[in-house]
Amino acid sequence: MLRSIAELAAYGTFAALLTAASLAPTTGNPASSAATSRSSDQPYASTASSVRGRLLFATKGCTGCHTHASLPSAHMQVGPDLTHLADRAATRVAGLDARAYVRQSIRDPGAYHVPGYTAVMPDLGLSDADIDALIAFLLGSGG
């Protein structure tokens, strides 16, 4: 029994490492490539935080409902495509900038309804640091 638990833990760790490796950039140094690709139209990009956000997006179940161009293995379309969220988030709710809108949408999933989608996003119970990382990924990646 103990051996089975240890094997499962090892397989889980291995799966997490494979997931992280599949999300890493395929060429160059991740820190330098992310830093050089940052442009003025991506004001929320933060290298370490956006990489962490991308990993969270893949591992916390976001890909179970949302698509994003940087994660081609995400096929479900229960929720809206989040590829170009930075282009529209600031205009969704009067008085909220893009960052505030995304934060509120993650923190209180039922706060806003996107026309054309009936599914309600679950509360993932994410920490403020996790939400900040997701915001950096979603608003900084742009596509």
Image: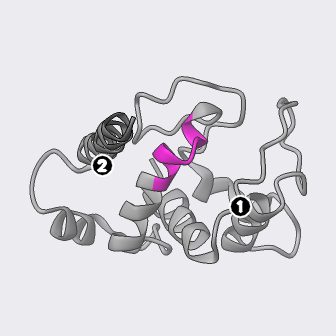
Residue 60 drawn in magenta:
yes
Could you say which disc has been placed on residue 20 in the image?
2
Position in image of residue 14 (x %, y %): 26, 42
Position in image of residue 12 (x %, y %): 36, 41
Q: How crowded is mark 1: few (under 14 residues within 10 Å), some or many (20 or more)?
A: few
Q: Which of 19 and 40 is in front in this view?
A: 19
State which quadrant residue 104 falls in. Answer: bottom right
Q: Which of 93 and 12 is in front in this view?
A: 12
State which quadrant residue 26 falls in. Answer: top left
- Name the residue rendered at 88%, 30% in the picture: 118
Is 50 rendered above or below residue 73? below
Please indicate whether residue 120 sits to the left or right of residue 43 in the image: right
Give the main secondary structure, helix, strand or loop, of the magenta stretch. Answer: helix
Residue 108 drawn in magenta:
no
Position in image of residue 68 (x %, y %): 50, 39
- The amino acid pointed to by label 2 is Ala
Please indicate whether residue 42 sits to the left or right of residue 19 in the image: right
Q: Name the residue under label 1.
A: 125
Position in image of residue 63 (x %, y %): 55, 36
Q: Which of marks 1 and 2 is nearer the N terminus?
A: 2
Is 123 rendered above or below residue 14? below
Q: Nearer the viewer, residue 27 or 65?
A: 65
- Name the residue rendered at 73%, 59% in the picture: 106
Identify the element where label 2 is drawn: helix
The residue segment tinted magenta is 56-63
